[in-house]
Amino acid sequence: MITLDFRRRRREAARVGDFDLPTAFDQHASSMLGFAVNLLRDRALAEDCVQETFLRAWRAREGFDPARGPLRTWLFAIERNVIIDVQRSLARMPTIASNQVDDDIHGNRDSASDTVEKMRVAEALALLSPEHRQVVVAVHLAGATYAELAQSTGVPAGTLRTRSYYALRILRGHFESQEEG
């Protein structure tokens, strides 16, 4: 009986060993911080979200299965849930009333649906290679032309158009798969 217990523990340790926290932090923390800062617009709050993400990942490390998907995807899914929790808690916080209402402050607040949509776009952009992401962001989000981007990067405009085509195809497939699920 002791031998069976030892074998069971060894199998569990091997399975848990698939999640190496220091390595995961070194490889993914900076991109996760950027993801959170882009969505929350508050660096301190974003840092707290990344910390909470790794804490939740450590607690749920038995649930990580590399056969189901890469570690990065698993961590970003956890972080997305953390950010949604933070957004919900911020929405429940009472605001201090004043005699004057500043329309600019209230006009710039994002609704929860806008935040979720931004998270979906940021999550999808994270799937792209840096070269493909650069084209999508510059041309389709910032409004630059292919000629302007070609001049600033030194990459031919035709190559940039091809990168844009494949990047948009990946993004479209990602959004369609989310709608089906």
Image (cartoon, grey):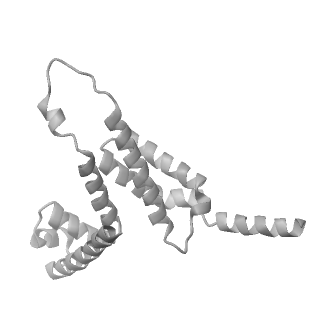
User: Horizontal placement of 148 versus 122: left or right?
Assistant: left
Residue 152 percent coordinates (x, y): 17, 67
**Closer-to-camera residue (168/174):** 174
Tell me the residue at 25%/50% (across/down): 113
Q: Quadrant of residue 179?
A: bottom left
Residue 55 percent coordinates (x, y): 55, 49
Quadrant (top left, top right, bottom left, bottom right) of the C terminus:
bottom left
User: Horizontal placement of 34 versus 98: left or right?
Assistant: right
Residue projecting furthest to the top: 99
State whether residue 122 is above or below residue 91.
below
Tell me the residue at 15%/69% (across/down): 149
Tell me the residue at 34%/37% (across/down): 90
**Closer-to-camera residue (157/170):** 170
Image label count: 0
Quadrant (top left, top right, bottom left, bottom right) of the N terminus:
bottom right
Residue 94 percent coordinates (x, y): 31, 27
